[in-house]
Image (tube, helix red, strand yellow):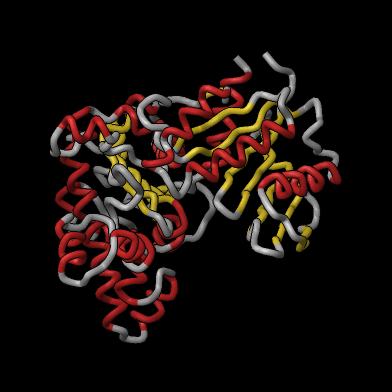
Amino acid sequence: MTSATRVLVLNSGSSSVKYQLLDMRDGSRLAVGLVERIGEGTSRLVHTPAGGERRERSAPMAGHEAALRAVAAELAADGLGLDSPDLAAIGHRVVHGGLRFTAPTVITDEVLAEVERLVPVAPLHNPANIVGIRTARALRPDLPQVAVFDTAFHTTMPEYAARYAIDTETADAHRIRRYGFHGTSHAYVSRETARLLGKDPSEANVIVLHLGNGASASAVAGGRCVDTSMGLTPLEGLVMGTRSGDIDPAVTFHLRRVAGMSVDEVDELLNKRSGLVGLCGDNDMREIRRRIDEGDERARLAFDIYVHRLKKYIGAYYAVLGRVDAVAFTAGVGENAAPVREAAVEGLEQLGLAVDAELNAVRSGEPRLISPADARVAVAVVPTDEELEIAQQTYSLVNN
C-alpha cells in the first residue's frame, strides 16, 4: 500500500494529450491541461493549476515525448512535478482492451504488446494511447502505470448481446464482435445515478445515454452492463455529431458498386461526414436548436432523426432490462441540451417516463432528477467524470 495520494491521468490522442492531476484523498483537481497540435509545427499547451491562473504557451513539439516533458515542466513549476513522492501512479485512458482486459491493469511489456495487437480493431485510438504510455514509462520507469480501458465495463455483456449474427469462424478469426466504448463514463454515471436514487448500484437498473459528439447508450443491470449501442467500433448505434450510427451494411456495398467509392472514402463518409453534420451541416446542438427556432427545416429534420434513434434505444433497453429505475443523460449534449432530454422521453409516459419542464430547464453541474416527484421511472442528469473514474480505478489498483 502506498502513502502517496496523487494520480496523474493521461488521455493521449493522435495529436493531443489531455491531463489531470488529482488528489485521491478527496478527488480534487490539482491541475488540468491540454497539449494540442502535437507534431504540427507549433503546438499549444494550456495549463491551469488549482487556485491559479491559466497559462498558455505555443512551441514546437515534434512528438508526445516533447509534449509530456512540457507537461512535466508545467506541473513542476507549481510544485507538482512528476518526481514528487506524492505521485502514486499514472492512469492512462486506453480505448480498446478487447476481451482480455476486463479491469484496470498495471502496464507491463506483455500488456503493452497485447494493446498493440488490438490496433487493427482500434486503428484511430490505440496507437496514440500506446505512444503516450511508452513516453510516460520512459519519464517515470519506476512508477506504476495503469491502463483503464473504455471497453472494460462492457465485457460483462452476455454472448447473445455481444456477438453479431455472422459466420462464427470468420468472426473469431478477426475478433469481430460488439465491444462498446465510453465504458468509464457509463460505469461512473450508472453508479452515480444509483447513488442519486439512494440505492446500491447492485440494486439499480439504469439506461445511460452518453450524448456528446460521440454518443452511446447502455443498459446496466445491477451495476453490470448487459448491452450497449456501440459495437466493433464507435460507429454503431446512436446518431452522433459526425457518425451515422446504425445503418444497413449494404449501403457500403451500394456506394462501392454504384458510386465507385473506395473503402477509405466510405469510411470517411460514415465516420466524419454523417450524423448531424451530414444531415444539416452542423454538429453543435446549440446551433441546430437556434436554426430550428428560425424555422430551418433541415435542422428540424436532423433533430428529429437524432431523437427518434434515442427513443428506439430507450425502448429497446427498457425491454432488455425488464425493470428500469432510471434513465440518465450525460456528456455535453445530455447534460446541457434540455430540448433533447424533453423530446427523448416525450410520448413514453406509458413506460413511466416524463420530465418536469421546470426541473429540466435548470442548468447545474450537479447530479439531479428532472422527472416529476411521482414518476415511476426517474429521469436524471448526471455529469460524467471520466478522469475521476480513471483516477479512482488506478488508485484502487495500486493502493491494494
Q: Is residue 353 above or below residue 118?
A: below
Q: Residue at x 83, y 42 (%)?
A: 76
Q: Is 296 in front, or is 176?
A: 176
- Left or right of residue 311: residue 139: right
Q: Is residue 36 visible?
A: yes
| On screen, residue 309 above or below 285 | above
Percent x, y of residue 123: 43, 46
Question: In this image, 173 relative to 253: left or right?
Answer: right
What residue is rendered at 73% in x and 22% in y?
Answer: 142
Q: How many marks?
A: 0
Which residue is depicted at the point 37% across and 41% down?
Answer: 121
Find residue 222 and report its horizontal and vertical position in percent. Answer: 32, 27
Question: In x, y percent, where is residue 26?
Answer: 66, 32
> Camera-side residue: 288 or 178?
178
State which quadrant residue 377 falls in: top left
Quadrant (top left, top right, bottom left, bottom right) of the C terminus: top right
**Can residue 243 be seen here?**
no
- List x then y, in percent, for residue 146: 58, 28
| Left or right: residue 22 compared with residue 233 | right
Residue 45 falls in which quadrant of the image?
bottom right
Q: Quadrant of the N terminus?
A: top right
**Residue drawn at x 74%, y 34% as measured from the top left:** 139
